Image: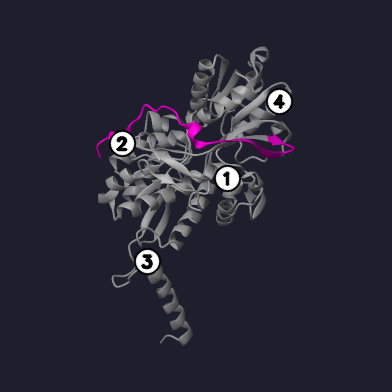
Amino acid sequence: MLTRREFLRTSTAATVTFWLFGTMSQGQPQPIRIGHQLDRTGAVALFGKWHNRALDAAIKLVNEQRGINGRPVELVNSDDAQTKPDVGKDEFEKLVTQRGADFVIGSVFSGTNIATAPLAKSLKTVYFPQGIATDITEKFGNRYVFKSYHTVRAAIEAAHEWVFANLGKRFTIVHSVIDLGRSQAEDWAEKIRAAGGSVQLISVPFPAPSDLFPIIQKIDLSKTDVLYHAFTAVETARFLQAAFDQNLQSRLKVLGLIEGIDILSTAEPWLEGTYFISGYPRRADQVPEELRAFDREYRRRVGISAEGFALENPREVVPIADLFGSWQAVFLIKQAAELVNWRGKADTPALIQALEGLTMPASVNFPQGAQFLRAQDHLVFHDHYIERVESGQLKVLARIPREQSLYKTGADYAKEEF
């Protein structure tokens, strides 16, 4: 027999569930399952960990907001995508066919995203890849693939005018051969040449060799204003340390995407004075004033300090500029699903059509600021920032409005048949 206390506790829990998700006459409503193609090991494992935390926090907030169409949402993780395209693709298939994922948030490894995209279409499952190689939306996308955060090309389109005006047009680009690095090299080279600049391209195997001095020696200092690097975070650290040993930071402007150092402390001497293109400031005091209330709530829920460190470990750097893609994907799903009253896979075509051209107002759901999702290539456009390491901390030098990141796309997925 239940005690009075146990009865009250059980009744309270039932009341809360009823309030959140409606009638319980048929039992609790079936949850909507959002899968995560999670890299637990490999080159992007730390990014994977924090994307997973952002997803967990976003789903908790969605459930506080009465779920999606009155149904609770669950996070379903893959075993380990391992930063390996074939493994990640297999993990995606398991999420959908064995674990019942209705939607999947992708790996941050671009190669895994590219390998997975055709499978998303064949399994008719909406997929939100978190890598940023341009080819994800240009060459290898389809109607089931949506990018909830920028691509390399969008970041370069946003920043190139500022870079050319303030840093120079004579580039040496040292890049990894993986999709992330190759994409940056190709897109920058096109912009530089169109602007009448010059570019030297130096490709580096993945993983990079232990001795990077021979790579450094290939840089023609007499023809270089800007040294651009394009690696994963661990290799960025090694490359910039090697460049510092040769005194390059004091002789050249050093530039990269924030993804290259987004899990690294900026207090290192080899980062002093370097420039980065980012999708969001690391430090709360650099966030635009009108977004700060949303930023505070976002950081609190994910567990990020005002300086960009983990709340439980002030020595662990959080890749805050990189996490919005996963956080926002959850709320894109919610917004589109509620527009079309999505109930299951039969309603997915309607949900996709709702996503195509969707606008997102600045809010806790979209703390990065107002954004929009282009129908043709399924890419979200948002503001960008130029940041520079000064006295060991990232400082915003310029905020670039989202409209400046628009580029001409060769894709038109909205015309594809379902």
Q: Secondary structure at mark 3?
A: helix
Asked whether the residues under the numbered discs 1 and 4 touch, taking CB atoms below 8 Å apart as contact, a structural biologist would say no
Q: Which mark is residue 249?
A: 4
Residue 145 belongs to the span the image colors magenta: no
Number of residue marks: 4
Disc with the residue nearer the chain's start (3 vs 2): 3
Q: Secondary structure at mark 2?
A: helix
Residue 305, how many percent across, how many down?
64, 52
Which residue is disc 1 drawn over? 320
In the picture, measured across the screen, residue 145 lies left or right of residue 382, that is left
Disc with the residue nearer the chain's start (3 vs 4): 3
Which amino acid, by three-letter code, is at mark 4?
Gln
Q: Gap in Å between the C-alphas at discs 2 and 4?
A: 45 Å
Q: Gap in Å between the C-alphas at discs 3 and 1?
A: 31 Å
Asked whether the residues under the numbered discs 1 and 2 touch, taking CB atoms below 8 Å apart as contact, a structural biologist would say no
Which is in the foreground here, disc 3 or disc 2? 2
Residue 194 position (above or below residue 62): above
Which amino acid, by three-letter code, is at mark 3?
Phe
Q: Residue at x 69, y 29 (%)?
A: 241
Structural crowding at the residue carrying mark 2, measured as other residues with C-alpha within 10 Å and reported as few (<14), some (14–19) or many (≥20): some
Q: Which residues are magenta?
A: 389-418
Which residue is disc 3 drawn over? 21
Which amino acid, by three-letter code, is at mark 1?
Ile
